[in-house]
Image (tube, helix red, strand yellow):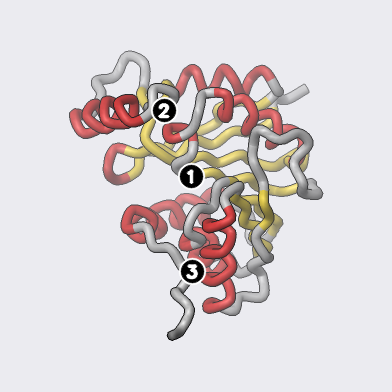
Amino acid sequence: MPDADPRRHSPPAERNRAPILEVLRRLLPDRGQALEIASGTGQHAVHFAAGLPGWTWYPSDPEPSALASIAAWAADAGLANLQPPVRLDVLDAPWPVQGPFDAVFCANMLHISPWSTCGALMRGAARCLARSGVLVTYGPYLVQGQPTAPGNVDFDADLRARNPAWGLRHVHEVAAQARIVGLELADQVAMPANNLTLVFRRTEA
């Protein structure tokens, strides 16, 4: 009996990978090195490495099943600029990677993990980003002073019912965590399905 395919599949990752890549192409220079945090299935890593051929893409995740899925997707894609996945938990310090990276990318982690991961993400990114590097996060957020989409209200309630430590994060609170380590929210891009892409850069000395 053949072994089960270790590749995991996320329908949301399949849907959002193209809009995110469009933003990354506008945002990033032609070449560089990117560290992806919480790569999950590996679908994003493969798509972004293929769509950004001048970039070396380093996927990571803390979960063994995710690492196996990423490795399987990468093996199937055969992309020279896609590196083997690294086990990385944002709460670990220091992170087991060598910088500097020109970009750190993290999608759909902050709302399905404890709030402590937000500060940990900011601290780790600040340590390993190049001086001109960017931290890019993607996912559903709450925006102070703006009406929240009904879908996000329901999603937030569902997340908190499943785990009280989860839930959609306020953009201003995420930005405050970034400022503590010298990163500033430089751009906020509206995305399909009530998501946002947030772009953080180093604060000028």
Foreground of the two, 98 or 64: 64
Asked where in the image residue 118 lies, by quadrant, the reply is top right
- Where does the image place residue 185, in percent across and percent down from the top left? 55, 27
How many numbered discs?
3
Residue depicted at x 70% and y 23%: 182
CB under 8 Å between callouts 3 and 2? no
Foreground of the two, 27 or 49: 49
Disc 1, SS: strand
Q: Which of the marked residues, 3 or 2, is nearer the chain's N terminus?
A: 3
Q: Is residue 78 left or right of residue 202?
A: left
Q: Which of the marked residues, 3 or 1, is nearer the chain's N terminus?
A: 3
Q: What amino acid is labelled 1 in the image?
A: Ala
- Where does the image place residue 123, in percent across and percent down from the top left? 69, 29
Asked where in the image residue 117 lies, by quadrant, the reply is top right
Residue depicted at x 46% and y 50%: 23
Residue depicted at x 72% and y 32%: 126
Q: What amino acid is labelled 3 in the image?
A: Pro
Q: Which residue is mark 3?
A: 6
Foreground of the two, 130 or 74: 74
Q: Which residue is mark 2?
A: 166
Numbered disc in front, either 3 or 2: 3
Q: Which mark is residue 157?
A: none
Q: What amino acid is labelled 2 in the image?
A: Trp
Q: Which residue is mark 1?
A: 107
- Where does the image place residue 64, in percent across and percent down from the top left? 58, 55
